Image (cartoon, helix red, strand yellow):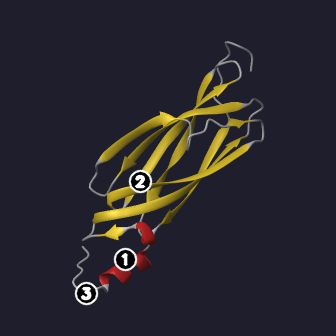
Amino acid sequence: MLPGMSEQPDVRVSVEVRFRADHSQPGQLPHGRWLFQYLIRIENHGAESWQVMGREWTITDALGRVTQVAGDGVVGQTPVLAPGGVYVYDSFVTLEAAPGSMQGAYLLRDAWGQEGRAAIPEFALAVPPEVLAELAQQPGRVLN
């Protein structure tokens, strides 16, 4: 892209989520400590290189509480995605009330200093039904 031109990057984001029962401490639903691990894949389908400079997240829990998170880079890095390039990383989030959801955007910059954004599609943070059924079988536990 030439300096001064404005074009949104063709950078696509996909997410895989996994509930981590081994790191969760369920309380009476929806309360507790629910940990979700997510794998992010960022793909540059455009003709220009883009560097991931930051991220913005909106996290919503089962009680409708919204948390905004913003920061530099991703997992301590600012990767450069050449045309056709892919960057993959994993991270986690904890909720005090499940289920919930996350969505956001990556803040990008090209070699000319032009800024762009890549949307992170909304994804669910849900406890699998088989885990809920197992929790319901525990003595003294009431799940609503």
- Residue 112 placement: quadrant: top right
The residue singled out by tag 1 in the image is 132
Q: Nearer the viewer, mark 2 or mark 3?
A: 3
The residue at the point 45 percent across, 61 percent down is: 36
Q: Is residue 116 above or below residue 55?
A: above
How far across and down, in percent of the image, does residue 43 sit? Answer: 69, 44
Q: Amino acid at mark 2?
A: Ser
Q: Which of 14/36 is in front?
A: 36
Q: Nearer the viewer, residue 45 or 80?
A: 80
* Residues at circles 2 and 3 in contact by the CB criterion of under 8 Å: no
The answer to whether 144 appears left or right of 86 in the picture is left
Tell me which corner region of the image, top left, top right, bottom left or bottom right, holds residue 117. Answer: top right
Q: Which mark is residue 139?
A: 3
Q: Residue 21 appears at what percent x and percent y?
A: 43, 71
Q: Nearer the viewer, residue 82 or 1?
A: 82
Neighbours of disc 2 within 10 Å: few (<14), some (14-19), many (20+): some
* Residue located beneath label 2 in the image: 101
Kind of residue indicated by mark 1: Leu
